[in-house]
Amino acid sequence: MIQRPRRSDDDLDNENDDDVREDAALLDIVDGYTRAKPQVHPLDVEATLCEKIALCVVSCLLIAIAVACVHAIWTTKLCVLIRDSHREVKYRRPNECFDHAEIDGMLRGLAQTFTTTLTAHGIEYWLDSGTLLGAIRTGALNPNDMDLDVGMSVAAFETLGATPLAFPERYKLEIVNSTLYPTRTRDAALPGRFIDKTSGLYLDIFVFLPSLDENGTALLGPVASSCWHECVACEGRPKHFAVPRDWIYPLMPCNFESVRARCPVNVDAYLTHLYGPSYRTRSWDLHKYIP
């Protein structure tokens, strides 16, 4: 067995002194390097001129994009699809676009022009169906309405067809068997229509014919038509419409879209017959929709 020579205490002290000197020398080197090149956090580094310009350009671009997006969202026109069943398709134009506000405005113009003109000439009418419903609920159009309805007696309708009326150029009145307001598309089921030629939206005119029930009660009701079945006689509603004459006459004044219009005198019975006892409450059931 080989034995290593035993180191003396002096040798150990000398080695320790050497280690201390080496450590001190290394610390001096590190300290000198640190003083020569101080460590700087990346976020504390001052940007160069080019970097500042690039940052400014990018910031401006991002702000411009954000402003453009907000403007586009705020001003984009949302076009509403008008079904052919709710317009005169001959007035449809390529690439047309109407939003809800424009459609409401056109329907409002139809109602105001028609009612004020007939009132001025003493021709009687009454608001009917969904138009009457809107008048009683809010005095305005029903949300998402796409047409208007009025009722007239036979005598009033004949007077309308024979009376020269000065409507604005954008409107057209079509009356069956009328030389003043000729039409090739109206018939006994839907004998009259007042049309906005800028869109094809319209106001339908239903003529109520007199009749008697089995008890001799005087009734009034329109000629059955496809329009009636599409627009009014839905599930749960009467398939044929005839009401006592005294539900309608004498006509009473009512407000509709800021004009004084005419409505049936017993409007509660009239609308209950059409839409049920909860007609004042709007239904959001899309499968059994009540306007």
Image: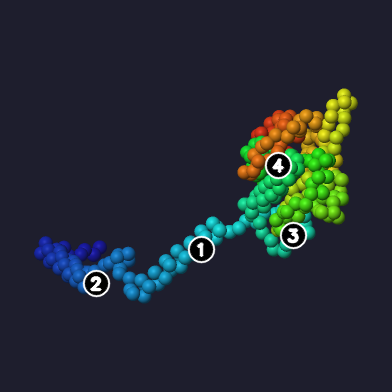
Taking depth in this image into account, of 70 and 240 the one nearest to the observer is: 240
Quick check: 226 above or below 38?
Answer: above
- The answer to whether the residue labelled 3 contacts the one labelled 1, judged by CB atoms less than 8 Å apart, is no
Disc 2 crowd, CA 10 A, few/some/many (<14, 14-19, 20+): few
Between marks 1 and 2, how big is the CA–CA gap?
Answer: 47 Å
| Residue highlighted by disc 3 | 92
- The answer to whether the residue labelled 3 contacts the one labelled 2, judged by CB atoms less than 8 Å apart, is no
Element under label 1?
A: helix
| Mark drawn on residue 37 | 2
Between marks 3 and 2, how big is the CA–CA gap?
Answer: 78 Å
Residue 175 % position (x, y): 82, 50
Query: Given the image, on which type of amino acid does mark 2 rest?
Result: Lys
**Quick check: can you spot residue 165?**
yes
| Residue highlighted by disc 1 | 68
Q: In which quarter of the image is the C terminus?
A: top right
Residue at the image point whose x is 45% and y is 64% from the top:
63
Disc 4 crowd, CA 10 A, few/some/many (<14, 14-19, 20+): many
